[in-house]
Amino acid sequence: MNEALRKKYIPMTETTYYTLLAVTKPRHGYAIMQYVAELTQDRLLLGTGTLYTMVGRLTTDGVIEVVPEDGKKAYLLTKVGMELLAEETKRLGQQLADGLKTLSGGVSTVD
């Protein structure tokens, strides 16, 4: 993967992360919005302007691609997109583990 692309997307915004999760299978814009809302229990609601601006950027960068589905324009993660999503998921997992360890008293601090 291109290092400039990695620097552009890692760390990822929450909206980008959830959008990439949504397009691990082909989904059109409204389906992406529904999937993200359902996955986050309505904690994250994507607006159409935000979504289509982001989808345009992700498509231009080769992170997702446009695929036809039922006569609609759908979006799907590319190989590069999957690599970015996997890297960000690993990073977030480590961040969570560090936080849990610290909050449970497993890491001492120097004052």
Image: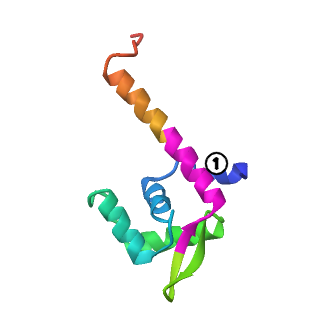
Residue 27: within the magenta?
A: no
User: Main SS type for the magenta part?
Assistant: helix
Q: Residue at point 55% right, 52% down?
A: 85
Q: Nearer the viewer, residue 15 or 83?
A: 83
Quadrant location of residue 109? Answer: top left
Asked if residue 46 shows in the view, the reply is no
Instruction: Report the residue marked by disc 1.
Output: 7
Residue 55 visible in image: yes
User: Image height check: is 85 above or below 99?
Assistant: below
Q: Quadrant of the C terminus?
A: top left
Element assignment for label 1? helix
| Relative image position of residue 45 (x, y in whole percent) | 32, 64
Q: Is residue 90 left or right of residue 29?
A: right
Residue depicted at 31% across the width and 56% down the height: 40
Q: Residue at x 65, y 57 (%)?
A: 80
Find residue 75 and report its horizontal and vertical position in percent: 53, 73
In the rendered structure, the answer to whether residue 76 lies left or right of residue 42 reads: right
Mark 1 belongs to which amino acid? Lys
Picture colour scheme: rainbow
Looking at the picture, does residue 41 appear above or below residue 111? below
Q: Position of residue 9 (x, y in %)?
A: 58, 52
**Is 88 a magenta residue?**
yes
Name the residue: 56% across, 72% down: 56
- Residue extent of the magenta highlight: 75-91
Horizontal arrangement in the rendering, residue 106 relative to residue 84 (left or right): left
